[in-house]
Image (cartoon, rainbow, N blue to C red):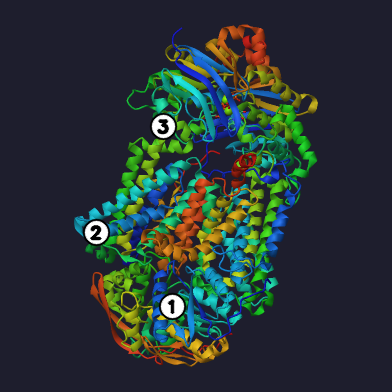
Amino acid sequence: MSAVILLTLTGLGLAALYFLVASGLSLVFGLADVLNFAHGLFLGVGAYATWWAAGNLPGAGSDGFGFVVAVAFGVLAGALVAVLVELVLIRPLYSRTIEQVLVTVGLSLAGVALLQATWGADPRPFPRPAWTRDVTSVLGANVPNAGLLLIVAAVLVLGALLAFLRWTRYGLVIRAGVENREMVTALGIDVRKAFTLVFAIGGAAAALAGALGGVYFGTVSPGQGGSLLIFAFIVVVIGGMGSVVGSAYAAVAVGLLQQFVNYYGTSGLGDLCVVGLLAVVLLLRPQGFAGKVATA
Amino acid sequence: MTEVKSPELPAPPAAVPDELTPGRVRWHGLRPYLPLVALVVAAIVPYSTVNLPGIFEGPLNSPGTLQLLAICLVFGGLAAGYDLLFGRTGMLSFGHALYFAAGVYGTDVLVTKAGLPLWQAALLTVVGGTILAALLGAVALRTVGIAFAMVTLAFAQVGAILVARNFGGWTGGEEGLPLDVSGLPTALVGVANTVNLYWLALAYLALVVFVVHRVSGSPTGRVLAGLRDDERRIGVLGLDPYRFKLVAFTLAGGLASAGGVVYCLIVGGASPHVTSSELTLSLLVMVVLGGPGTRWGPVLGGILYMYLDHRLTAFGTSDAVNSLPAVLSRPLSQPLFVLGTVFILAVYFFPGGLASLRTRLTPVLTALRRR
Amino acid sequence: MLATRGLTWRIGEVAIVDNVYLDLAPGEFLGVIGPNGAGKTSLFNLISGLRRPTDGRVLLDGEDITSLPPHRRARLGLGRTFQASSVFGSLTVQENVRLAVQAHRGGSMKLWRRAAADREVAAAADAALDRVGLAHRGTALAGTLAHGEKRKLEIALLLAGEPRVMLLDEPMAGVSAEDVPELVAVIKSLTGDSGRSVLMVEHHMDVILELADRIAVMHHGALLACDTPETVMANATVQEAYLGESL
Amino acid sequence: MSEPVLAVEDLSVRIAGLHILQGVSFTVAPTGVTVLLGRNGVGKTTTLRAIVGLTPRNGEIRGTIRMGARSLLARPTHRLVRDGLGYVPEDRCVFAGLTVAENLRLAERRGTTPAYDKVFALFPELERRGRQRAGSLSGGQQQMLAIGRVLLNDNRLLLIDEPTKGLAPKVVTEVAEVLERVAESVPVLLVEQNLAVVRRLARDAVVLSAGRVAWTGDARELLLETALTKSLLGVGASEVHS
Amino acid sequence: GSPQDTASGGGDGAAPVKVGLVYSQSGPLASYGKQYIEGFKAGLDYATKGTGKVGDRKIEITEADDAGDPAKAVSAAKDLIGKGTKIIAGSTSSGVALQVAPIAAQNKVLFISGPAATDGVTGANKYTFRSGRQSYQDVVTAKSFIGDATGKKVVVFAQDGAFGDANEAAVKKVIGGAGATVSSVRAPASATEFTPFASQIKAAKPDLLFVAWAGTTAPAMWQTLDQQGVLSSTTVVTGLDIRASWPTFGAAGSKISFLSHYFDGASDTEAAKAAKAKIPGGTLDLFHPDGFTAAQMVVRAVQEGGDDVEKMVKALEGWKFDGIKGEMTIRAEDHALLQPMYQAKLSGSGTAFTATAEKTLTGDETAPPVTPMKG
Ligand SMILES: Nc1ncnc2c1ncn2[C@@H]1O[C@H](COP(=O)(O)OP(=O)(O)OP(=O)(O)O)[C@@H](O)[C@H]1O
Ligand SMILES: Nc1ncnc2c1ncn2[C@@H]1O[C@H](COP(=O)(O)OP(=O)(O)OP(=O)(O)O)[C@@H](O)[C@H]1O
Ligand SMILES: [Mg+2]
Ligand SMILES: [Mg+2]
């Protein structure tokens, strides 16, 4: 019994991590229609900026409020980089979707190499509050606090994103802009601003995932973002392109599936099952869990 | 018709296939023979001792240079084959690496573990790779757009996981599997015979270009071009989109596994690099770098990409780079940084890829000539 | 020739196409009118196979084709145009039509032939282009055509397939007044004694009146009436729901 | 005669090497409907798009376009629209993935009260179908949405490209009536193929032919003179009055 | 020119000796590569007494980056061989070592593999040697932690793939052969969440847990083992990675018994002192000895063999010498490098950790079984 509880809670922690990574990806993909391969870079920027801030920024540290400041700095850095990327690289290519994807591919290559050139390829210990290393006993299962932290953060991010989409006009503007940018401008709306904002939010979400991922793994390394990215992609697609709620469901499904299969099955089966789930979902419901049926 | 955009990727920046534009002005009678001339020139390159300092490490006929060129040529062919899917039919597959990897590992395992003679191993591998593509394509093509990209990615990922698992020690896991050369024809073994590998790669490239060219110029190629624009319309005209896409997918898969066979011989083994989704991504990069849907673009893109990929490691450690201040020299010594940056710049400044250079340069050239 | 039996398409509770019985005799020209949103295009989608009906059957020459995919129906001689032009934007006008001709001549896989060398296909394509008056635009990319030209290309694509039953969805929409008579003539020439049947949705009443043998009126997905032009035009409901007071 | 609301002077547009417009000049009067006529492909849509600043990237524009004293060229589209230039494009361009209500909400301009009453009075269908995705609307319903979207706001000039295309005769009449009423308060530059509609609405007419202006003047005059109609529009007077 | 040309090695006495180093300057193993090259330079200096020459012949080093990709390594090797290089060394990763080794045999040049730990390099062919340790030696060292193995329960926790396979097989042979029951828990190398595996291990209640894990996910793995109480309930043995990774063990570090190939302070030999003095920073690390030893072997080969590769091979086979780690022997039968190995403990906290040697095992004690030479 305690094994099931342990696996469920740690699986949810993993799901939360996947969701945090996927949420920004899903937002940018769903709204701005950019399949952002550079998302891993934003993740890395967030993680390294937090790491750097904890050691160098006055007021920031690895514990208590200092840690919050460090994470805030990391998130800000991620958002900033995302905005820069949008302004300089993505914006001039609007309506050329394929090229946008390609630029993000190039960026993911160059960006990760840049992180590596600056801080080396080896993992560095990540500054984190001591309590995140401990476990909380839940019905006899030792659940890592870092996982619980991720779950809380994921729920908060989910709420914030939904509020953004529901209560502001931006969601509307961007969804329309993806379909037909020209027409949105012809309605008197500066669609460029909205797109930049979406990138900023996507970047911030990624950076938060990077920082919390650092807490979870205990280290930060340049390739970390990339390895999480593939699962994030799977989550985004299973969840239905660009549906934030769908991503949340999919993350939970993927996290739990992986955890339980890895425990009860043989090694590596967890990954295969996730990939299998992706294939099955797409074949049965090409639009994903939450995608609407397109009339074509 | 009340129509809704389905969540599909738009077709790639389309180029009208050369083959389908009849009556284009031929500048002179020689033009149709240019590919042949290029082929002959490429074939006699190994007889030249010309030294191109900075471009190659040694003279053209040195094994190091020929090896590099051979790898470039294979990827030129691979990119051209991938373009059959991406540039010409508008199918964005993220799993093309799988069929290439099937070629590499198929040959390697059959020769090294099963002890088959090379020709049998090669034949079996290409047939097997083609069948694999046909089977997986038959499933994956039930989806379109991003979903298709993701299903193909998922299949390729399964391949990567299986190779990494090292079942029964067959694939060598992350260490890869060196090719057992004891049963191979001696002409393919040893540094002194690198030139034969070069010719093999050249032959592969020529084969792919020829096949892709013929197919795109054929009635089927016309249908593929139509599919790229509007699949529904093709159906209403009385053609089964699924069948045509499956043929393109299978053909491209077969060509890729043939490329894998050649690559395995050139590199002398298999390593899990070839199963990674990054390889498919780099194929995409190559095609775009060159110009999707054009005859020579993908080939040039593939050659250039692989050349940079290999040569940048040398560039990164060169004195010129090392003497720069650390802010510059550190990133520049990372080959991937340079490659990524070059690629981004290329997307910006050559939107149609290398293939569009000609049309872009023509006005400049004529202006110059008039002077 | 073409018949629908209780054809119904529902989305949720709403019937978009509601229990439609329609018979199209060989050589007959049936005009379909009805207010916007009556379900005319949806009916075409069901007949051509782009949509599966929730109920009812589609018969061609007495054969049930309800479960066939679009391309199989096309091969049986069912051709259609689209209300929103859908042409192959990255191909030239000529290539567009050649593709259609080739599709008609047999869709078998020809991987190794030279497409450009097939003179017969080219000739048939040029003939089709000539008929709609687009021959001079042959080398233009279809994507860059002006709206009216795309409409003509749509018809050329249809012609190339030499269908026995043609579904035309508002062929005149957006065609400049000058070209209307010409296009009407083209469509007229398609029928006549050739035995081809046409089902045409059109809002230009004068065009409908000139071409149609019978007129079907759709309203809220159901077939309100299907009769001779005179009877239909005299129908009070049609007057009120569709025609309104004339300008 | 008072100052024109819009003055186009010597407008030339080249797209991908093609001279689509070659020195087009005309004005739009501050009241009533000015109609832009011409065969398919003469450049009517191109003209409208040049005015709202939507010429494609690979296009080249020369000449001047002025609204009052202000030059419109080189100003971004969204600013032009916010300053009161309403545009209804040829292919309607409703946002297929958004609901009808969302389409309308998107068109609300900040700082003004959207005139939903007016729009719903004109097109009750739009109110009823508020939650339907615009992509699943019928062609005519989409057209209503496209026009309704623009009418939510106050405009100084409306550019409308073939609004009656694909509409049932009854709706054509309705749209024409709507436009007639709209034109009482806002000047309209209208592209229209339906000559009956033109006859009913147009005050001034500009006829384009192969990228040039072939005729400008009073619309009634154009439609009355058989010879003129025949030579410019290629239709007999009988058709005009049918 | 002819397409079959390869430059022939300069025959006369005073021409420099070309040595090609193909290793990772970039890519995931760049920091291993860096240690290797630093060690090599120090070793060359040491073995040539600061002259960089053997006799009157200068050793001319050409470096090439393989970025961890065997294809690039093979290209670089072919290029070097084509230019007349007779000695190639390097190979930071096992994949590279395994694919370059056959190239060396096909072209009859000397290949001295570097940090690559795969057992497959030993006995690969007549021309292939190694300057580092191999997985089997790690496992034998691990065995020394449990004393008498009879009746003990041992679990191997390893990642999927060849590295894990090799370790699992070696443990079965070495410790299982000594009477212990060995079972294994395997996990994908890409795993990010280790609770299921930790639970499996815990359920098995082993007397000894042998962990073979490489890569950036290692810290998360250790943390989970610690949190789930595995580290405190049994003896856990693993290999000690490079210094930079020590802080990532965190609190878990002091609960683990380490086997070590090398760390600063593990030995106090002549060579170690010389190396310390020479390398930048003055602190030795895991892979400095591999480079250092390689240089010693290169110098020996050139001294005895001149330009004749066959003679070089003869000169290296059976050679006993003093390296950084102490007495090293190149076993003639399969070119295994017999060398001392260490048991170590990690102590400290934060970013300051120190390793101390608990016990040194001699080269003979850790000798792998002889593999028949394959080619
Ligand atoms: N996928 C869908 N989901 C919901 N409603 C739909 C869908 N497709 C069509 N409809 C509705 O069905 C009705 C019929 O649409 P259809 O396009 O067939 O009309 P139509 O008669 O062709 O009109 P028009 O003359 O304007 O083209 C419309 O009210 C439309 O909104
Ligand atoms: N983006 C473009 N690239 C190339 N040619 C174009 C482009 N846009 C328009 N054209 C060409 O410019 C010409 C004028 O087009 P435009 O759409 O303005 O015509 P129109 O008068 O609105 O015709 P219609 O009545 O059919 O709508 C056409 O020949 C068209 O092919
Ligand atoms: Mg319709
Ligand atoms: Mg127009």
Residue D102: which disc? Answer: 3
- Residue C183's x, y, as percent? 69, 23
Residues under labels 3 and 2: Cα distance?
48 Å
* Residue depicted at 72% across the width and 44% down the height: B27
- Amino acid type at circle 2 is Asn
* Residue nearest the viewer, comparing B100 with E53: E53
- Amino acid type at circle 1 is Pro
Q: Secondary structure at mark 2?
A: helix
Chain of the residue where label 2 is placed in the rendered structure: A
- Amino acid type at circle 3 is Glu
Residues under labels 1 and 2: Cα distance?
35 Å
Above or below residue E171? Residue A197 is above
Q: Which residue is mark 1?
A: E115
Q: Secondary structure at mark 1?
A: loop
Q: Is mark 2 within 8 Å of ligand 2?
A: no
Dot 1, how many residues are within 10 Å of its Cα: few (below 14), some (14-19), or many (20+)? many
Dot 2, how many residues are within 10 Å of its Cα: few (below 14), some (14-19), or many (20+)? few
Dot 3, how many residues are within 10 Å of its Cα: few (below 14), some (14-19), or many (20+)? many
Q: Is mark 1 within 8 Å of ligand 2?
A: no
Of the residues tagged 1 and 3, which is closer to the observer?
Answer: 1
* Residue nearest the viewer, comparing E220 with E37: E37
**Quadrant of res E184:** bottom left
Chain of the residue where label 1 is placed in the rendered structure: E
* Residue depicted at 37% across the width and 53% down the height: A42
Q: Which residue is mark 2?
A: A56
- Marks 2 and 1: in contact by CB < 8 Å? no
- Residue A242's x, y, as percent? 43, 45
- Marks 2 and 3: in contact by CB < 8 Å? no
Q: Is residue C32 left or right of residue E350?
A: right
- Residue E26's x, y, as percent? 44, 67
